[in-house]
Image (spheres, rainbow, N blue to C red):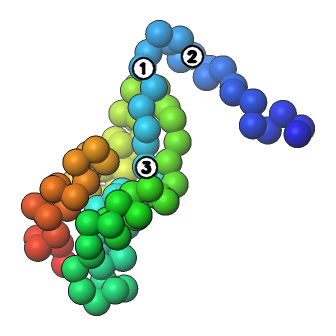
Amino acid sequence: MFGWFKRRKLRGADPNEPMVTVFLNPLIMLLAGAERQKGSPLTEAEVLHVRDTAVCVQMTQSQANKFYESLDSQMPVPRLNPEFIWDEWQAVRDRIQ
């Protein structure tokens, strides 16, 4: 409808550059907020639910790097690998306030 959901060509992007998934809000912040709201540690299922319902987009790797540089210039935030979200969350959750 209206062409809103058609794939657009990215201006200046190399068509051979790999696309990556970028979470618009860092997963670590989403998980910390969910745990704070719950008032107790999240279960593995809850961590996966936060990851699976987080807003994300596909970008080229170079666009993702620029996006992350912009975020880091405001406030450096560790990034969690969505494939290993449970293990990485367990490793960092105690250090987050």
Q: Residue furthest bottom?
A: 39
Q: Which residue is drawn at 25% across and 54% down?
A: 85
> Which circle, 3 or 2, is nearer the viewer?
3
Side of 54 relative to 8 (left or right): left
Give the percent coordinates (x, y) of residue 26. Answer: 36, 56
Q: Which of 63 and 18 is in front in this view?
A: 18
- Say which label, 2 or 1, has the lower sequence index: 2
Q: Can the viewer see residue 76 in this picture?
A: no
Mark 1: secondary structure: loop
Residue named by callout 2: 12
Q: What residue type is labelled 1?
A: Pro
Question: Which residue, given by chain and number where applicable, does mark 1 sit on?
Answer: 18
The residue lying at 11 percent from left, 71 percent from top is 95
To which residue does mark 3 refer?
A: 23
Q: Which amino acid does label 3 sit on?
A: Phe
Q: Which of 58 and 13 is in front in this view?
A: 58
Q: Between residue 9 and residue 76, name the one nearer to us.
A: 9
Sequence-first tag of 3 and 2: 2
Q: Quadrant of residue 32?
A: bottom left
Splitting the image into 4 quarters, where does residue 42 fall? bottom left
User: Distance from label 1 to label 3 (Cα)?
Assistant: 16 Å
Q: Going by the picture, which residue comes out furthest to the front? A: 45
The circle on residue 34 is none
Judged from this view, the residue extending furthest toward the right is: 2
**Residue type indicated by callout 2:** Gly
**Snapshot quadrant of residue 62:** top left
Location of the N terminus (image quadrant): top right
